[in-house]
Image (cartoon, helix red, strand yellow):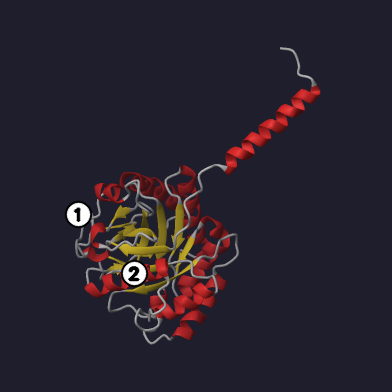
Amino acid sequence: MASLHPLIAAALVVAAASTAAAAASWAAPSSPARPLFREYIGAEGKNVTFADVPVHPGVDFHFILSFAIDYAANATNASAPPVPTDGRFAVFWDEANLTPAAVAALKCPSSRARVALSLGGDTVFGANATFRASSVDAWVGNAVASLAAILTRYGLDGVDVDYEHFGERETPEVFAECVGRLVRALRARGVISFASIAPFANPDVQAHYAELWRRYGRDFDYVNFQFYAYPSNTTVPEFLAHYDEQSARYAGAGGGGKVLVSFGTDPASGGLRPGKGFFRACRELRRQGRLHGIFVWAADNSAADGFRDERLAQTFLAGNAPGFP
């Protein structure tokens, strides 16, 4: 083929660039970001469905299935404590109501809802759900295979890490490598699009999650800090001081440091609650540009009060009603 005259070639390049720029300027705008609300669901068999939970159209909503746990009942002695399975996870949430079909129905094309699963939790079969790993490589291999299968079968979008107890050999370094490599592998497989951690103010817990954040913070999108683990007489200034402390702890390391505020709906939850100043604290964080979202620990979310508080929290996020207590 004959070559083009240099001036003609240059003109064609300029014209192509102008056409591309014009096309970009007419491209449909991306969906605007909405405030984020997250809720744990399915723990303790409370018989709650997705449809039971109020979802405000003005928020992005993450349901977090509680829990997937790498433990099993003792096969030879039903009264003995459960046994760890070295990263082979099984579903422990309410499978009768929170099914793959229910997830698919929730995530219709027009829905802003996404669904994740949470790992670990506090207890399993009445015993601590202690993090155990025979080795980093073995645990990661088992965890990637078992969780990829669960995530795919349920059509889930993300994972949350909520281990709260750790064995003597499971040092912060071991925990960080196990969980960090797991999340990175799940992202590489394309089976998750977001990840979060759920620490609370306990020295051993903070040591493990701080090391995970130091090594793999860039692989996590949110910090579901359990502010409801603080005393029930927490004041607004104390809550804001706790938020400052945890935001500093989980900043940097390549991570976004997006610490979400939280409350619990069950009677055992402490911290600052709706009606006691929670929304005053949220309003101040929003004024500072630091309100990244709200999550709820809803172990008793069948209660009417729990649903009331969830509605208030989502309405606050979506509309900033000034009179919220």
Q: Is residue 289 above or below residue 159?
A: below
| Residue at point 74%, 13% (across, down) | 2
- Name the side, left or right, on which 98 lies relative to 247: left
Percent from the top left, x then y, of residue 79? 20, 65
Mark count: 2
Q: Is residue 274 above or below residue 132?
A: below
SS class of the residue under badge 2? strand
Could you tell me which quadrant the C terminus lies in? bottom left
Question: Observer-nearest residue: 166 or 306?
Answer: 306
User: Of all residues shown, which one is farthest toward the top?
Assistant: 1
Q: Neighbour class for label 2 at 10 Å: few (<14), some, many (≥20)?
A: many
Q: Please, what is the three-letter code of the amino acid marked with disc 2?
A: Trp
Q: Earlier in the sequence, mark 1 or mark 2?
A: 1
- Name the side, left or right, on which 97 lies relative to 200: left
| Residue at point 71%, 12% (across, down) | 1
Q: Please, what is the three-letter code of the amino acid marked with disc 1?
A: Ala
For residue 297, which numbered disc appears in the image? 2
Percent from the top left, x then y, of residue 294? 41, 68
Image quarter for residue 159?
bottom left
Residue 111 visible in the displayed image: yes
Residue 81 visible in the displayed image: no
Q: What residue is pinned by disc 1? A: 96
SS class of the residue under badge 1? loop
